[in-house]
Amino acid sequence: MAVRRAGMGLNQPAAAPDGIATGPGVFHDAVLPLLSRIGSYDAKIDPVLIDQAYTIAAEAHAAQTRENGDPYITHPLAVADILAGYRLDGDSIITALLHDVIEDTKVTLPALQSRFGAEVAGLVDGVTKLTRLELQSDRTKQAENFRKLVLAMSKDIRVLLVKLADRLHNMRTIHFMREPERRARIARETMEIYAPLAERIGMDRVKTELQNLSFAVLDPEAYDSIQARMNFLRGQGADVIDEVRAELLRIFAAAGVEVIDISGREKSIFSIWEKMQRRNVAFEQLSDIMAFRILVPSREQCYVALGAIHAAFPVIAGRFKDYISTPKANHYQSLHTGVTLRHPRNQKIELQIRTPDMHAIAENGVAAHWVYKQEDASPADVKQFRWVQDLLEILENSAAPDEFLENTKLELYQDQVFCFTPKGQLIQLPRGATAVDFAYAVHSQIGDTCVGARINGRLMPLRYELQNGDQVEILTARGGTPSPSWERFVVTGKARARIRRFLASQVREQNRDQGKAALAKAFRQDGVDGSEKVLDGALKALKQASLDDLYVAVGTGNLGAKDVVQAIYPELRETRPSRIVPGMLARPARPPARSNELPLTGLISGMEVHYAGCCHPLPGDKIVGIIATGKGVTIHARDCMTLETFATTPERFIDVDWDYAQLGQAKDGGKDGAGRDRPFTGRISVIAANAANAVANLANAVSKQDGAIANLKIVHRQQDFFECLMDVEVRDLRHLSQVIAGLRAAGGVAQVDRART
């Protein structure tokens, strides 16, 4: 390995701790370009420490190679170079060089801490833990990986920056990877997680490159097709950028606008593909694949330049966005507009107008106003970003890694809508957000207790989809709680996680109360002591962590109340044998239905069966059975959220399905008659105008579709509208859909959905 003598004034390396070797006071040839790049923006960073980190990494990875045959050290060196391009601090550069040394080498974390300090050791440890998780291809492991990343970056954003640079270099070299399945998995994870995260912290260049590289792996045919079209257009109009630039300069000169720079660029291949999918158009139908960036000296000049452009060219409707007065969540600021140039070639273009400082933030995000360059800043300053706080709250409220990944995807992907509180506070939400999302964005407690919303002074349903500029006043009630129906229409991960957490706790509380009552009854029937002191002494034998867990286990049917009594008083087994026979279910005296009476397959003949009241399954729904000791089997729709409470007891799930042959006989008037004599109940949620004849209109609409209202409950009433839950007797899912369609066509009805409550 070639080395060169260090410059004057550099200290010799100190003695090394175990696992770390040292060399003389020299710089390696391979690290000189990196040192030169770092020195161009921060002379305070010690080049000796950078070189020492390189030495340690080179020796640790000496026996390893990349999949293309290059020495492994080329990877950490490339990651460090990417971060230096963003002018990051010395600890970040050192971490980039060392981010893989803990994995499968003799270098220890204490040794790194002794040499480079606690901050570097903490950063390396954070990135190392993520790397270990990434080696797992399992979906749950991917979710856990992201979960840990959120925790790590909430403490120090540099963990995310190093991770993004690491992922970027790996994506640049992904074509050397031999296994197609592994390439696709990494590309999909990059597209779903890392590209949105790069966008969230404003690193637009990184986001765009990650998207394009991932797209090339996931859909190479579409990528090559768009690239070929772009190459063709590039050859057809090689001089378009220069012509447009000259035209814009002429307009600005006439208006007295001082211009620092005008640059034109093509939109990225993936962004073009996204636009084609979103608008459902072919490539040839896209007219604005060119974008021009205009840099002016000040914020005021941005608006002057915008006025000059709008005065000179026809504006494309709906394309103007002012991110200067209302910046994005990642601090992005710019004016966006779309115009049609008369010359040259009647060209439609997108224009972005900003100052140089705004441009630095737009390109490099958090790295452009690096918090660690401020002496009074700390790594915790990253929590100033609202989206990080939201992700942390989702993490707190999500029960499982998969759920956390799902909820954070909602938080990361969507475009923004800007709304205001009555006091003028700006709230940014994803496009499609509702009044409930707004309530949770203001404060979790306000979300939990909201009962209504006043939008622009008018009472509106909580599921109202917010528009840019709406002023939103949330009405709350003491003791109010989240409704299960909210989960169907909220779009923010924060709201969904909070609602699910409440519902899970509510179900647990109900199961706890039911279990406690069942145990009290069982002990009373046998005439023995069932005090909490007695139960507490039996927890270990019953394999329960606490009394509450015991009550919940009995309430959910995981433990029978009689089994608990007999576990504490074994002598009762001889005098009063259990009615539970292995392989059979105990039956109550008057079951609601038996398996041979219902059009279901997969059940033992005579088994007691209930249809779940939470999801009201109908023929046509995918269903599953849940066994409850002493209660038979309850049939749930497979998308019922109540099933989450049984996730820890998969042995209670049984495969069932509808007996469509029997249903067909019933509908044809066959002798079984199960479908005819036992109509199914579907639950519908309706929002309608609060008029005198509203309920009569609803009943008439249901009747016209050959349905019958079994029950109707008004759950919310305001001056302008009311919301009700309606149980309707129908034949199957198709029949329910016909009833819903009929209700939607009825006068005064604003919204109709199938209810899951």
Image (spheres, rainbow, N blue to C red):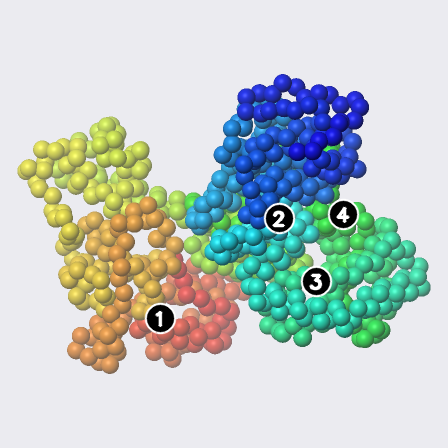
**Separation (CA) of disc 1 from disc 3:** 45 Å
Q: Identify which amino acid the numbered label 2 is placed on.
A: Leu
Residue at 54 percent of width and 24 percent of height: 19
The circle on residue 267 is: 3
Question: Disc 4 vs disc 2: which is toward the camera?
Answer: 2
Answer above or below: position of 352 versus 345. Answer: above
**Drawn side of residue 302 relative to residue 98, left or right:** right
Residue 35 sits in quarter? top right
As helix, strand or loop, the secondary structure at mark 1 comes to helix
Q: Which residue is mark 2?
A: 168
Residue 289 sits in quarter? bottom right
Q: Nearer the viewer, residue 361 or 565?
A: 361
**Can you say which quadrant of the picture contains the N terminus?**
top right
Q: Identify which amino acid the numbered label 4 is placed on.
A: Ala
Residue 256, image x, y percentages: 93, 59
Q: Identify which amino acid the numbered label 3 is placed on.
A: Lys
| Mark 3 or 4, nearer chain start | 3
Q: Which residue is mark 4?
A: 360
**Could you classify mark 4 by the number of other residues whose Cα lies within 10 Å: few (under 14), some (14-19), or many (20 or more)?**
some
Question: Disc 1 vs disc 4: which is toward the camera?
Answer: 4
| Mark 1 or 4, nearer chain start | 4
| Mark 1 or 2, nearer chain start | 2
Say if mark 4 contacts mark 2, CB within 8 Å: no
**Can you say which quadrant of the picture contains the C terminus?**
bottom left
Residue 583, image x, y percentages: 15, 51
**Separation (CA) of disc 3 from disc 4:** 19 Å
Residue 384, image x, y percentages: 65, 40
Say if mark 1 contacts mark 4, CB within 8 Å: no
Question: Disc 1 vs disc 2: which is toward the camera?
Answer: 2
